[in-house]
């Protein structure tokens, strides 16, 4: 992923220093150090560093320990096997695509017949690796020499060097004419943190859209909060969640336009059918909590149709139905109580029922779940889920259990 440079203080390592430290890790000595840190425990860092510095250059020891820490952080995104062989930068770990998402997107592109793709703002290579494993030859471009060194090392470490060509350049100056697809992941962080103005992305969103339109196929990765108004009319907008947490939005070019919500790891994918907003009505026996990707994609109406339900309030994305109809796009709860919001009444009810485990969910309520749990002081062998929400505009508590 491209980077926006920040001014460095006198004590901040320069890009050349970081690059030299990384290259030292690729030497025989550096590889031995890294191999010995496979089960490294950060709690023992001082003792480990002191021991290693007796026989190795302190700068190399620091680089190895830093890389060991990054590999441990990367397990959540890349899995233990790949993370143990790969190389990372702090920004690269934070901004890299999770393997499940990258593999899904690579499969979609390969399924469209893509054989050579330009990965613009490639970062440490999460997407390039997934694409190469899907049989796509990748031109990976980033303007940071350190990032390019890292992705080159990752391609070699994973046996993919013959499918990933790395080029250190400004992505806006790269000729992608020999590729049948482009993937653009603009940097959305600068020297002062997250960037919200699309034209302050690196590269700007307007450039990324132009690059996508020029290619036969393209995918443009964006933050999941991207407004629907920014979706180009010729693109498909897809929101992707992993285990219920929305991770990103993707604008797809080169296929039919539309809206989609995809839930990983299962792979269920819901497309928009143009349904009007469902009506609102009273709470019935079952409450459905749509996945975050479904909500972001504005596909709650499609879920309501599948479960023969309606909203509990025109402004709240909870669907209720008298029937239990399992769907991968929403979690179902059986509702036992519908009460006006009142903390003392809720506390008394939970005490009466011997409830000691309370899961609090909220949508359309200003009450903080942790604060409510402290006030309830639950005790007992039973469990309940409490929904703090609005029904027909009124603050309401719904009590129930997951189905």
Image (tube, rainbow, N blue to C red):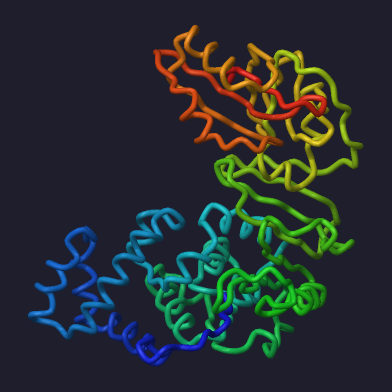
Considering every residue shown, the one lying at the far top of the view is 352
In the picture provided, is 238 more to the left or to the right than 403? right
Considering every residue shown, the one lying at the far front of the view is 344
- Front residue of 168/215: it is 168
Q: Where is residue 200 shown, x and y percent of the image?
A: 70, 78
Residue at image location 68% in from the left, 61% down from the top: 109
Residue at image location 23% in from the left, 79% down from the top: 30
Q: Quadrant of the N terminus?
A: bottom right
In the picture provided, is 166 more to the left or to the right than 241? left
- Front residue of 238/380: it is 380
- Front residue of 108/246: it is 246
Q: Where is residue 44 shown, x and y percent of the image?
A: 17, 61
Q: Where is residue 337 shown, x and y percent of the image?
A: 65, 13
Q: Quadrant of residue 38?
A: bottom left
Q: Quadrant of residue 86?
A: bottom left
- Front residue of 9/143: it is 9
In the picture provided, is 10 more to the left or to the right than 300? left
Q: Quadrant of residue 225?
A: bottom right
Residue at image location 35% in from the left, 64% down from the top: 71
Residue at image location 56% in from the left, 86% down from the top: 143
Q: Where is residue 70 shown, x and y percent of the image?
A: 36, 66
* Numbered circles on residues, count: 0
In the picture provided, is 154 more to the left or to the right than 237? left
Instruction: Give the vertical position of 37 relative to 27 (above or below).
Output: above
Q: Quadrant of the C terminus?
A: top right
């Amino acid at each position: 992923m491209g980077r926006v440079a920040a001014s460095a203080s006198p004590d901040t390592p320069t890009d050349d220093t970081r690059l030299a430290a990384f290259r030292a890790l690729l030497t025989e000595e550096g590889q031995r150090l890294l191999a010995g840190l496979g089960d490294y425990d950060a709690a023992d860092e001082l003792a480990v560093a002191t021991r290693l510095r007796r026989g190795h250059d302190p700068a190399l020891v620091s680089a190895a320990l830093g890389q060991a820490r990054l590999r441990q952080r990367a397990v959540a995104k890349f899995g233990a096997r790949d993370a143990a062989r790969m190389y990372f930068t702090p920004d690269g770990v934070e901004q890299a695509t999770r393997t499940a998402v990258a593999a899904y997107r690579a499969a979609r592109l390969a399924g469209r017949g893509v054989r050579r793709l330009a990965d613009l703002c490639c970062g440490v290579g999460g997407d390039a690796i997934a694409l190469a494993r899907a049989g796509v030859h990748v031109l990976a471009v980033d303007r940071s020499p350190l990032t390019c060194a890292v992705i080159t090392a990752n391609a070699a470490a994973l046996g993919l060097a013959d499918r990933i060509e790395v080029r250190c350049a400004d992505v806006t100056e790269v000729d992608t004419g020999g590729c049948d697809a482009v993937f653009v992941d603009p940097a959305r962080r600068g020297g002062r943190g997250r960037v919200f103005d699309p034209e302050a992305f690196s590269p700007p969103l307007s450039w990324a859209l132009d690059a996508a339109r020029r290619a036969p196929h393209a995918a443009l990765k964006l933050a999941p909060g991207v407004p629907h108004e920014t979706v180009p009319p010729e693109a498909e907008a897809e929101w992707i969640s992993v285990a219920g947490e929305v991770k990103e939005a993707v604008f797809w070019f080169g296929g039919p336009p539309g809206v989609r919500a995809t839930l990983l790891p299962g792979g269920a994918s819901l497309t928009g059918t143009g349904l009007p907003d469902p009506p609102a009505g009273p709470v019935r026996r079952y409450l459905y909590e749509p996945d975050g990707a479904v909500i972001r994609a504005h596909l709650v109406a499609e879920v309501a149709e599948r479960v023969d339900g309606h909203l509990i309030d025109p402004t709240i994305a909870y669907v209720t139905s008298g029937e239990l109809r399992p769907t991968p796009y929403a979690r179902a709860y059986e509702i036992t109580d519908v009460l006006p919001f009142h903390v003392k009444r809720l506390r008394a009810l939970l005490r009466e029922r011997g409830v000691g485990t309370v899961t609090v969910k909220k949508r359309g309520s200003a009450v903080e779940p942790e604060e409510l749990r402290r006030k309830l002081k639950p005790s007992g062998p039973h469990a309940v889920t409490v929904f703090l929400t609005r029904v027909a505009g009124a603050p309401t508590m719904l009590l129930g259990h997951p189905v």
